[in-house]
Structure formats: structure tokens, C-alpha cells
Amino acid sequence: MHSIIKNFLVFFLVFLIIAGFLSAFNNPWEQEQETGFGDMVSSIKSGEVESIGVEGNILYVKYNDGSNKKSRKEDGESLAGLLKFYGVSDEQIANVSIESKDPSGAGFWIGAIVPFLIPLLFIVFFIWFMMRQVQGANNKAMMFGQSTAREEKPEKDGKKKKITTFTDVAGSVEAKQELVEIVEFLKQPQKFQKLGARIPKGVLLVGPPGTGKTLLAKAVSGEARVPFFHMSGSEFVEMFVGVGASRVRDLFKRAKKSAPAIVFIDELDAVGRQRGTGLGGSHDEREQTLNQILVEMDGFDSDTNVIIIAATNRPDVLDPALLRPGRFDRRVEIDLPDIKERDAILKLHAKDKPLAQDVDLRAIAERTPGFSGADLYNILNEAAILTARQNESKIRQDSIAKSIEKVMLGPERRSWILNKKEKKITAYHEAGHALVAHLLEEADPIHKISIVSRGRSGGYTLKLPTEEKRFHSRKEFLADLAVLLAGHAVEKKIFKDITTGASSDLKKATNLARQMVTEYGMSEKLGTRTFGDKDELVFLGREFGEQRDYGEKYAQLIDEEISRLLDEAYLRANKTLDGAQEKLEKIVSVLLEKETIEKNEFEELMA
């Protein structure tokens, strides 16, 4: 409404300007200077006029000096009669060449119509524009319930476009094998229908963020060469009741027209959360949208070649009706890549990047356990940015190593200058972590120690496992607790005081001890059971949704066990440090001098 009023005021202002212009100039196309009839008669008597052109009532007077002027005579009167009436002699009239011609149609009509035509055209254009605005608003209102899904086709305007295939997806071997069947069904549905087989109508891609769920869905579309409709789950839900369900109907209608096709719904948990929580009512807009999705998926005809692929990293909150056979009846797990898959992903992302001869992608893969495909791409991208900033032409190994630390901990903060005492405390703190980790057999080996600030930490100790681990033992957790508390122990041992630098370590150690007791059954006193229901309520969130399935007696025992594990880890760290004072001083002296110790140099110090 505001834009319509604004447009109206603009057009009205323009109209006033044009009307004022036309009123000031009767005929702006006429350039001749006008003179009165009496002045023209005087000029004829004095012999200054060379010729007169008569066109209706308009007289075009040409003077002996070459100038031209325009004059007018009365209607219905001849020029000769008027001149004689004003006392011009026949001899004077004979000296002037008088030529009579018919008025030109174009000039006459332009002069007569233009002053009225321009305002009329302007008014017509204004009315047309206003009607178009109103019609556009009505169309938008009518299109509000239509699907906002973007459609991608293998060919666009008759030209083949670059498509994503399985060769563009590194790793996820088992997931790709599961999805190959989907591609075969879209290409050759008769092959399965002859045997009475029914391909899954819905495929749910489950995995942590950044593992390539969306990329895999696009690869399925590219391999099958079929239209690909994609939208986010949050795009269904609006503040108006019924819009989400209407968009679902429109999306499936478009997909059926383009069949065979793939419909991809990203972040399915935004609209597919469990119903019947007792909050928000059963007529909640999100639940209506979910109900429509369930109906559309189960209402497909047997010969409709439309497959729904959805992605989520929260399968635990999805409604059970979504996961039953006939809907999302196939679940494809996409885990974080292992070392071989990380190596393949790095090679894929490094294709268009100039690498130096010293770059070893396998070593980078070994140094990045737990990284997703998106994290690995970010590492190489940060390395390329760092290389460009240093005005170099090729990406080196140390640039990639720095980018790993930047992704894990944040950028270096060399502007955060510590005083001598704080620098010394940080050096002892990080040296304590590294030394205890080196001396405990169950702990992971040290890769780097630094007292250069990154992110919110004053320094850091980077320790990485030697091989991929899917399971962790109790001994490993106990060693990790001792390593986490070693920095705190060193501060108290050397400086007879403690600082706030260990706050992050204490938080991590407390959380790990709590998990050991309540989730992993690693407490000898409490036995092999878990404590606390971790299911998240749809509306309350994680903290409020955690339910206690134990009494006050066990709550006290849990706190006692957590404290016992932390106390034992602290004593173990102190005991480990007692017999290695010389090695501790070596590490500290090198850190204070160089600020950073790499893996090889650290192993030489500990030899």
C-alpha cells in the first residue's frame, strides 16, 4: 500500500510539471519569432519585406536581411484586401512576392492535438500502471500458497549444464552404493516392476553437518538426469494457517508433472518433528504441514516415478510416521570420513588449487581426525587465502597446517601480547599438558605446542590419535582426564597459585567425567547403567527436555563419582610430573624462546 501511494505521488508530480510546461508554451515546436500585423504592414511600406507565405491564417514573412518572422491575419479575409485596407499601395504590394499554400496536415494536427494528447496519454499510462500494481498484488496473494522449491534440470534452454555426479563426491562409499539403486530405478523402472519390486519412495540421509548430504542428493539427480526440486523444511512453515500444507501439495504436483523426478527436502527436522507433545495444540501449522507430507508420500501411484530424498542431522526428533515403510523407509547413514576418505576428499578439493611439491595430503588427512568434508574444504580454502595474502603462487604444507589450527581454534592473536609473568605461566601450563600426554601410554601423541594465542585460548597443545578410533576405552578417558588437569596441576606446583587459564580444561574434564558416569557405565560404584533421559522435547529444547530417571540418592552418588574421577586424575597428573621436572623445564625454555614446538622437535626433547 505504501509503494502504491508513493508511485501515485511521483506520477502526479510529473503530470503537474508537464502541464505547466505545456501551459507556458502553447506550441513548443514553433521556433519563428512572431510580429504583429500592423508591424508587418509598416515593414511592407518601407520596402523591408521580400516575400510573404500565406498558410491559412498564418503569415510567414521573409525580410530583405534574411530574417524570418511569423504573423497572423483575420479569418475569412484575403491578404491583399487587408493590405489595401491598411493603405498599402498596389505598387508596394507588387514589390512583395506573395505565395499562398494549403496548410500541411501534419503540422496542423500536431499543433492542434499535441497540447491535449500528452496529458491524455499520461493519464492512460498512469491508470494502466495502477491496475498492473493491483493485479500484481492479487497475483502474489494467489501465489502465496504455491511451492517455493527451486527446480534444476539436466538441460536448460536446450543447453547442457554442468551437473553433479558421484565422481564429484569423495568418500561415503556405502552411502553411494545405497543410492545407486535409486538411480537405476529412475533410469529403468521396468527392471524392478517386472519382478514385483517396489523401490523405496523416501530416502532419509542422516549424518553430522558438513558430511555431504545435499551433495549426494544432487549427485543422484545428476546421475539419473532427471529434474531436481530442492527446498528447505523451514520454507514450508509460515505464519498463516494452511500455507505450509498448500505448498506441500503444490510441490508434489509439480514433481508428478515432471516425473521421473527427485524432490529433496533439506533440514527435514524443521517440519518433521514429533507430533502430540501437548504444546501448541494439534492444529499447529507445523503439524498440519507434516500431516500433508505424510499423506502425499503415501498417496503416490504405483507408476509415479518420484522419489523423495531428505536430509537431517537430528533423526531422533522425527515423527515415527515419517520413518515407517511406504514413506522414508530407507535410511542412509553418512558418517564423518575416515583417513582414506579424508585423503580422497582433500584430493578432490585440491584439483583446482596449485600445490607446492612439499604438500602431502595424506599427512593432512592424518592430522584432521573428526573433520567433515566441509571442514576439509574450508582448510584448503583458508590455505589458499593465506597463500594469496603472502603473495605466493603455490600453496605450501605449512600454510595448510596453519589453516588446520585456524579452523580448529581460531586465528592467531599475536596482537594479544602477554606480559612476562603471563607468558611464563602459559608456557608451564602447556608444557604440563604435553609432558603428561607424552608420559602416559594411553594418551594420544603430541603434534604441536604453542603459546601463541588463538581464539579465546592463551596457548594450546595439539594431540592427535595415531589411528582411526570408533571406540574409546576407560583407560583412555582416564588418561585424557589427567592430561586436561595437568596444566592446572603445574600452575599450582610451580607458582603455588592457580589462574583462570585452566577454566576451559576444567569444564572439559568435568563434562568427560560426567559422561563416563552417566552415559558410558564406566563407574565401578554405580555399575552398568545410564542416568538421565536425553530425548529432547520438541518445544522445550535440550536443557529443559532432559528428564531425570533416578532419585536423589543416585544424584548424590553421581556427583561423588564425578569428583572422585577428577581427584584421581589430578593426583595422577601430579605424580607423573614429579619425576619429570627436568623435561618440563626443557619444554618451557624452548617455548619461551620460540613460542612453538612441532612434533619432531618435541620428540627430540623427550628422547
Image: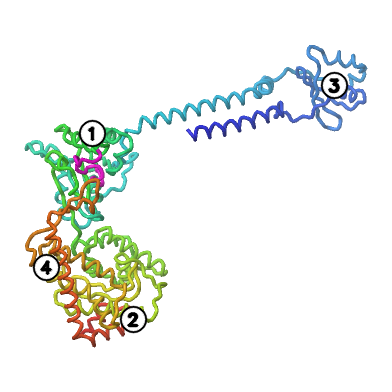
Dot 2 crowding, Cα within 10 Å, few <14, some 14–19, many 20+: some
Q: Magenta: predominant secondary structure element?
A: loop
At x 32% / y 33%, what residue is drawn? 145
Report the Cα–Cα distance between label 1 and label 4: 52 Å
Q: Which of marks 3 and 2 is nearer the N terminus?
A: 3
Q: What stretch is highlighted in magenta?
A: 264-280
Q: Which of marks 3 and 1 is in front?
A: 1
Alpha carbon separation for disc pair 2 and 1: 69 Å
Mark positioned earlier in the residue sequence (3 or 4): 3
Q: In which quarter of the image is residue 278?
A: top left
Residue marked by disc 4: 473
Instruction: Based on the picture, tell me whether residue 267 belongs to the magenta stretch.
Output: yes
Label 3 sits on residue: 37
Q: Which residue is drawn at 29% across and 41% down?
A: 153
Question: Mark 3, mark 2: which one is toward the viewer?
Answer: 2
Q: Is 546 above or below relative to 102?
A: below
Q: Mark 2 points at which residue?
A: 424
As shown in the figure, which amino acid type bears the numbered disc 3? Phe
| Magenta region includes residue 426 | no
* Secondary structure of the residue carrying numbered label 4: loop
- Residue 457's place in the image compared with 552, above or below, is below
Residue located at (11% from left, 68% from top): 473
- Give left or right: position of 183 versus 228: left
